[in-house]
Amino acid sequence: MNLEDFKITSGINSHQNASIERNEKTIDYSSSKPLSYADILSITKGLNVISEIFDVNAVVTVSGTNISAVALGKSLEEAIVQAMDSNPLDFVNANVVVSAEIDSDAAKMLKGVNIIIAPKFTKNAVEYLDSHDICYVSIETPLKDYKKYLSNETIVTPLGTLVQTPNLSELDKETFKVVSKNKPTVEQIEDAVFAWKVAKHAKSQAVVIAKDLKTSAVAQGLRSDASEYALNAACERAKDAVLASDIPLDVHDINAAIQCRIALVIVPSASSKVVETVDKYGLALITTGITNKLF
């Protein structure tokens, strides 16, 4: 089913009408079933994240428009298992976006989700998904080109129409700095970059905890105590993990991270008191010079 062949089934609420139109920034894709307004928003969120890690075996699960889990693996099947382990409750009925071709084995692993989104599906996978009435979306535009299709972000309000350019921020070696006395390992830096990419697309205020290229917790859209919420959700998995925040943290947040045995914190910037605290307790601290807020 191509884009021209279907209409949006409903708005966010059943009493709202909705439509979808092709434009010059529309990627090529097809869907086995009609999609709703909410489906399109959710799939877009997952694709935004997967576009940051498209060149590895990656899995992103999205509930509504919230990122539930992100994981990498040596194989796609391993990445699926890692994402499932990261957040098993939200994995059920989630929309799952993957970076590689779905075969019948992967399809069977994902039979409990809402929609599967992938660059390709094997013939056997399609037969399995069709026989089990599972919706799947094939992204025919190469994922490496996805960011080229991002348009200016537009919100129409009674006060006027807001327009801003898409967030294409990338980590810059000139501003990416280890500012603590304790230096992170190569593996911890890889986890920090991974967590930063996830936090970039999570709703502000976002705190992501990750280890071994798998999220342990994603806190987003909270007015306060995002760090404590994420740390509580990660629980024992916070030990020796990385904590990434899209905004600067205060000493209270750092103390909470210390109590949960976080090994490395990555933030846009840090005050002298924060640096003094991490040095006192032996944490590693990276500043990026980049703030990624998403409302």
Image (spheres, grey):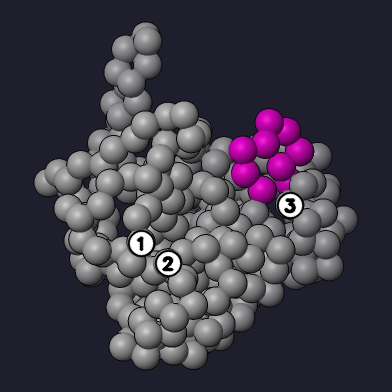
Q: Amino acid at mark 2?
A: Cys
Which residue: 57% across, 53% down? 63
Of marks 3 and 1, which one's residue comes earlier in the chain? 1
Give the alpha-carbon distance from disc 3 to disc 1, as whole Å.
35 Å
Of marks 3 and 2, which one's residue comes earlier in the chain? 2
Give coordinates of residue 281: x percent, y percent: 82, 57
From the viewer's perspective, is the residue at label 3 or at label 2 nearer? 2
**Secondary element at image label 1:** loop
Q: Is residue 290 visible?
A: no
| Residue under pointer 2 | 135
| Residue under pointer 3 | 230
> Dot 2, crowdedness within 10 Å: few (<14), some or many (≥20)?
many
Magenta range is: 219-227
Instruction: State yes or no: discs 1 and 2 in contact (Cβ < 8 Å).
Output: yes
Which residue: 30% across, 29% down? 154
Give coordinates of residue 264: x percent, y percent: 68, 61
Where is residue 82, by image quadrant? bottom right
| Residue under pointer 1 | 33
